[in-house]
Image: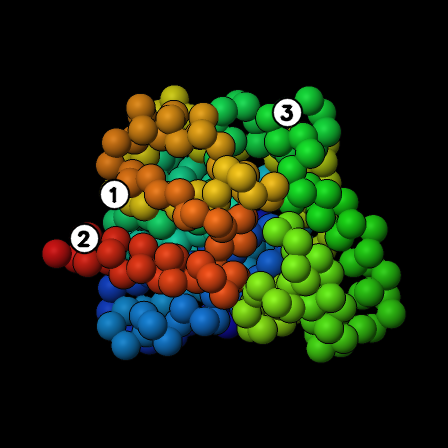
């Protein structure tokens, strides 16, 4: 399905009863709607579940030079206003989590609550970049992975590789915890990663590398809706939420419950050992806001 805005044509998937309470699922950078396919059956019986491809991702339109948080928040606002027509619970991972947090601050009228999975909020460094430009996130393996993607994805796309072929390669790649992704991640998660890579406008990574991604979330302001923040284990080399981020949230947004998922890295919902933590958080928040 498509929604046309002034900036781009946005692809989305819409499951469940359109009259049911809405849940909007937002993916991380380089990913697409498929990263949340596993969650849909858990929610669609009682909720309208909408999954959005951000601009530059999946089957949404390309807007080179506009891959910033203001742009991604605008994509989410368009879905909330033009499609949902009522406040939604927003579930976001990484880029999607940072977008959900910014949306909740700037348009709380559209948001009932948020679940933020290792969100890209970067409160501790005051920066939305994780490059080697001297930030707190220098050396994080997430950004090393981005560098590899930046160089390899165009070649995969040009070669016309299939999702299955890319997924087979990903299964052999060492995960941040050491074992190959094929051992630690769900098969559906690896397939979704592969699909997202093949559908990606790889220039979405440029603002991450050069520090121009322009955050919307303000670490010195409250997130004025209830929510749950899931952070990866600080011992994991790819966790992006820091102790400083959690402290800042505790100070400014006391209605956001903060949980560290022991042993998890950045990709919590992809991991066989930790997906249930995300599912539990989503169900708990829905029960909380729906009373």
Q: Earlier in the sequence, mark 1 or mark 3?
A: 3
In the picture, which quadrant includes the C terminus?
bottom left
Question: Taking 26 as reference, is 154 left or right?
Answer: right
Question: Taking 220 as reference, is 254 left or right?
Answer: left
The residues tagged by marks 3 and 2 sit, at their Cα atoms, a distance apart of 36 Å
Q: Secondary structure at mark 3?
A: loop
The residue identified by callout 1 is 226
The residue identified by callout 2 is 288
How dense is the environment of label 1, judged by Cα within 10 Å: few (below 14), some, or many (20 and up)?
Answer: many
Q: Residue drawn 48% across and 49% down? A: 263
Q: Earlier in the sequence, mark 3 or mark 2?
A: 3
Label drawn at residue 135: 3
Q: Is residue 21 visible?
A: yes
Rendered location of residue 241, percent (x, y): 49, 37
Q: Secondary structure at mark 2?
A: helix
Vertical placement of 113 versus 274: above or below?
A: above
Which residue occupies the foreground of this view, 194 or 265? 265
């Amino acid at each position: 399905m498509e929604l046309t805005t002034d900036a781009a044509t946005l692809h989305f998937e819409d499951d469940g009863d359109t009259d049911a309470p809405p849940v909007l699922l937002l993916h991380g950078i380089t990913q697409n709607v498929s990263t949340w396919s596993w969650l849909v059956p858990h929610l669609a019986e009682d909720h309208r579940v909408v999954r959005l491809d951000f601009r530059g991702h999946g089957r949404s339109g390309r807007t080179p030079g506009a891959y910033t948080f203001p742009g991604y928040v605008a994509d989410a606002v368009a879905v909330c206003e033009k499609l949902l027509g009522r406040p939604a619970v927003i579930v976001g991972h990484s880029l999607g989590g940072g977008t959900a947090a910014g949306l909740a601050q700037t348009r709380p009228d559209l948001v009932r609550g948020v679940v933020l999975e290792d969100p890209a909020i970067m409160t501790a460094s005051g920066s939305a970049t994780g490059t080697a430009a001297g930030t707190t996130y220098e050396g994080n393996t997430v950004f090393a992975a981005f560098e590899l993607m930046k160089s390899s994805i165009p070649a995969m796309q040009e070669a016309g590789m299939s999702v299955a072929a890319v997924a087979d390669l990903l299964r052999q790649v060492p995960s941040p915890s050491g074992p190959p992704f094929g051992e630690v991640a769900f098969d559906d998660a690896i397939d979704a990663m592969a699909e997202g890579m093949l559908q990606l406008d790889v220039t979405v990574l440029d603002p991450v590398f050069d520090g121009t991604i322009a955050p919307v979330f303000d670490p010195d302001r409250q997130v004025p809706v209830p929510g749950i923040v899931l952070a990866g284990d600080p011992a994991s080399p790819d966790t992006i939420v820091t102790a400083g981020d959690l402290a800042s949230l505790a100070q400014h947004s006391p209605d956001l419950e903060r949980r560290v998922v022991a042993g998890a890295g950045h990709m919590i919902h992809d991991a066989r050992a930790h997906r249930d933590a995300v599912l539990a958080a989503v169900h708990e928040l829905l029960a909380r806001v729906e009373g």
